[in-house]
Amino acid sequence: MSALNLALLEQARQFADNGDARAEKAFALVLENDAFNIEARTFLARVAMQAAKPETALEHLSVALRVAPGKPALWRSMGLTRMALQQWPEATTAFEHCLQLAPAMHAARLHLGQCLERQSRHDEATKTYLQVLSEAQRAGLWLDAASTPEWLAEAVAHAISVANRGRQEIHETLMAPLRARFPAGELQRVERAVRGMLGFETLQSPNPKQQPTFLYFPELPDTPVFSRELFPWFETLEASFAAIRAEAAAVLEARDGLSPFLALGENDRAADYLGGAQPAWDAYFFYRHGARYDAGHAACPQTSAVLESLPLVRIEGHAPEICFSVLGAGSHILPHYGTSNIRSVVHLPLIVPEACALKVLDTEIPGKAGECFAFDDTYLHEAWNRSAAPRVILLMDTWNPHLTEIEKLAMAEVVARTGHLNTAG
């Protein structure tokens, strides 16, 4: 930018900071010398919206987004402009772009719900409102008048009204078929879990260090680490340890098929999940989110055969979740919480160097090669590898053994139909 353009821009900024009406002309002059100046385009778009001239704002924002498509604030402004023009599909697309870049921009998600309503996409609007209210309120926002910006108050109140109706509809949609299949007395804990998930009832563990990020199932024993006697099939898995370990070693040597374990969003940072000088956490998947990875099964036939013989959790779009988990030398999985206590996490340690451990609350589990163990990951837990070699385990999810068979069947249906509400985990 030339010295003249810099001077013009600085003058325009000073006018804007002081609320001087000359700011609009000053930024227009900036554009005469630099037609793609994002700051000027953004300011003039805002002025145009305030003057009820959304067509003019649209022109400015269209140019700005061609220059900087990675700025979520520009997409939000575009969404609001499209709303003013009653261009609801285009506004929806703009807010979706914004949220891909900035998932925690709550106001944009609230506006997305409004756009979906305007298009009579009522189920999607309800789900969007439920999600944004949950996210915002977890962040301490929109809880009352003091935590809700005045300009959003009416929209938030409307979202709450729609969400409350939607919660009741979702509750009945979930519970009615379960009541028809199972005795009412067998569904009492399921009913409470669903009510808690939908916000009708506040449920929390008596242990403050157990904090599921999505769904808490009440009245289960306080068991951060499970007794192996609760998993009679551990012996089947351990009997194939040597074959599984050999296939894992071959995968590790070839490095083919390994991928990062963490699926990070646009605004997620690996440093929030992993520590260490050169942190690395990779996985070789057999199942992920319920989808079967045929290549993994074909390359590791003995591991595959054992897995398919086990009582796997099968929930469409969610489970099983099974992989060789490879924690790199010097890596630290930072303390965190899992999504729901209806599951337990099973480890079969395969390659375990010295100075490796999993810590669940105050219990350190070094992990002995060939011996399975299971824990509830909704308790605060972490893992580390302080050695100079990778640590490899067979990692898989299974049911919390304290659930009844009917509760397992019921919760499989609940999760399959409501997993879209899980935005934390």
Image (cartoon, rainbow, N blue to C red):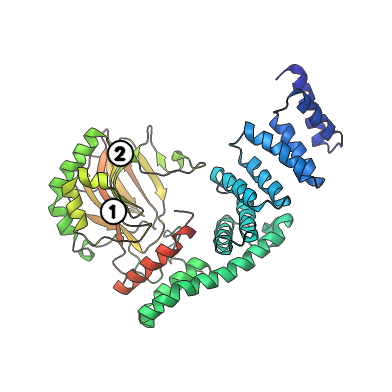
Please, what secondary structure does the residue beneath circle 1 have? strand
Q: Residues within 10 Å of mark 1 (few under 14, many from 20)?
A: many
Residue at 70% of width from left, 56% of height from top? Answer: 152
Question: From what the image shows, is residue 218 above or below residue 330?
Answer: below
Q: Which residue is mark 1?
A: 396
Q: Residues within 10 Å of mark 2 (few under 14, many from 20)?
A: some
Where's the N terminus, which quadrant? top right
**Image location (x, y in percent) of residue 19:** 84, 39
Please, what secondary structure does the residue beneath circle 2 have? loop
Residue 46 in view of the camera: no
Q: Quadrant of residue 351?
A: top left
Q: Quadrant of residue 279?
A: top left
Which amino acid type is marked by label 2?
Leu
Mark linked to residue 81: none
Residue at 23% of width from left, 33% of height from top? Answer: 254
**Image location (x, y in percent) of residue 206:** 43, 67
Q: Is residue 128 left or right of residue 386?
A: right
Which amino acid type is marked by label 1?
Met
**Toward the viewer: 336 or 153?**
153
Residue at 40% of width from left, 41% of height from top? Answer: 274
**Toward the viewer: 166 or 333?**
166
Q: Is residue 303 left or right of residue 279?
A: left
Residue at 45% of width from left, 63% of height from top? Answer: 418
**Image location (x, y in percent) of residue 389:** 25, 34
Q: Residue furthest top?
A: 3
Tell which tag, 1 or 2, sits nearer the viewer.
2
Residue 250 in view of the camera: yes
Question: From what the image shows, is residue 6 above or below residue 78?
Answer: above
Q: Which residue is mark 2?
A: 258
